[in-house]
Image (spheres, rainbow, N blue to C red):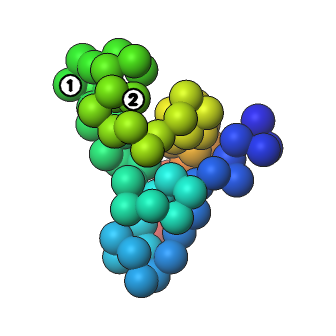
Amino acid sequence: MDELIKRITSDPEKCGGRPCIRGMRIRVSDILELYSAGLTSEQILEEMPDLEQEDLKAALIYASRKLDHPIIAA
C-alpha cells in the first residue's frame, strides 16, 4: 500500500497544492467525485485515459487515511 500512496503528489504550483495523481492535474477529489456519481473503475479509466487502476486505488487509500484522523475540537 505504501507504494500506491506514492502516486499521490502535492505541488503548490498545480491545483493549488491539492493532492493529485502522479503530478498530473487530476485531483484525488476528482476521482472521488466520479465514484460518488456512480461511475465504476472501468468507466473512470475510460473517462480519464491517463489514469491507471493503481491510481484509483491510491486515491481511495489516500482518502481513507485522511479520514481516519480524529478531529480535534478547539
Q: Is residue 49 left or right of residue 55?
A: left
Q: Is residue 71 left or right of residue 42?
A: right
Name the residue tied to disc 1: 37
Where does residue 1 sit, x and y in percent of width and height? 76, 35
For the question of whether residue 70 can be seen, the reply is no
Characterize the local packing of mark 2: few (<14), some (14-19) or many (20 or more) Cα atoms within 10 angstroms: some
How packed mark 1 is, by other alpha carbons closer than 10 Å (few <14, some 14-19, many 20 or more), is few
Q: Residue furthest bottom?
A: 13
* Residue 21 at x, y percent in the picture: 50, 53
* Structural distance between the alpha carbons of marks 1 and 2: 14 Å
In front here: 37 or 25? 25
Please give the name of the residue rendered at 42% of the width and 83% of the height, measured from the top-left corner: 13
- Above or below, 15 against 22 in this view is below
In this rendering, does residue 29 appear at all? yes
Relative placement, left or right, of 17 versus 68 is: left
Amino acid of disc 1 = Ala
Residue 22, picture quadrant: bottom right
**Amino acid residing under circle 2:** Leu
Q: How many marks?
A: 2
Q: Which mark is residue 45?
A: 2
Q: Is residue 20 above or below residue 31?
A: below
Residue 71 in the image: x percent, y percent? 50, 52
User: Is 10 or 71 nearer to us in this picture?
Assistant: 10
Farthest-out residue, right: 2
